[in-house]
Image: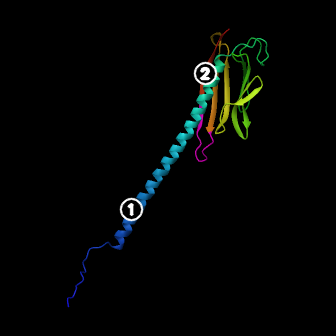
Amino acid sequence: MKVIKLNKFKKAFSLIEVMVSVAIFSVIILITSQIFSLTVNAQRNAIASQNVQESLKYFLEVVAKEIRMALPDDSGVCGVVPGEIYDLTEGETGDTLKFKNYEGECVIYTIDVDDGVTRFQIVRDGNTGYISPFEIEINHLDFELDSDLLKQALVTVNIEAEALNLKDSKSQMTIQTSVSSRYYK
């Protein structure tokens, strides 16, 4: 019968080596998961910012065209001083701009609370509509009117808005643009 000898010096991992390798692996996994979490949050913020930008871009295109093409309200029917183009009423959360558009309709721009969300409201000849979506809340709307500039009215629009559709990431944005009327005095 053959006797098998056991080798006492057979190479194997010790308990300390296993614990150190598990600790290093755990740190690497933790760092990787944190980087992934930061990337996901950054993407959510970017999407929220993009939503706000796209909504405000559309808003500014519609508003700029209509403000640029405004006509003087000689009759005063639209709430504008006869002979003037715009009427501006200042409020705490937002201003109200009144004018007569190129189609002869009386137009009012203001903000209004609709189902708990503050939205940009347009009233044309008594027909009310909203131009900002429910996912975007308008925090402040400010119109500045300079009607003496080179005998051509200039309207500056300041709007502060934020995205509401993503609960963990809110993207707040303030934009400003100036639009001059095509009508000369």
- Residue at the (60%, 33%) spot, across then down: 55
- Residue at the (67%, 33%) spot, across then down: 140
Name the residue furthest bottom: 1
Residue 80 picture location, percent across and down: 76, 17
Residue 170 falls within the magenta-colored stretch: yes
Q: Which mark is residue 24?
A: 1
Please name the amino acid that badge 1 sits on: Ile
Name the residue furthest top: 185
Which image quarter: residue 121? Answer: top right
Number of residue marks: 2
User: Residue 175, can we see it?
Assistant: no
Q: Is residue 108 left or right of residue 33?
A: right
Which image quarter: residue 178? Answer: top right
* Label 2 crowd (10 A; few <14 / some 14-19 / many >=20): some
Q: Nearer the viewer, residue 126 or 144?
A: 126
Q: Is residue 24 left or right of residue 101?
A: left
- Which residues are drawn in magenta? 163-174
Please name the amino acid that badge 2 sits on: Ser
Q: Which mark is residue 178?
A: 2
Q: Nearer the viewer, residue 58 or 1?
A: 1
Quadrant the C terminus occupies: top right
Q: Nearer the viewer, residue 166 or 82?
A: 166
Name the residue furthest front: 1
Residue 183 falls within the magenta-colored stretch: no
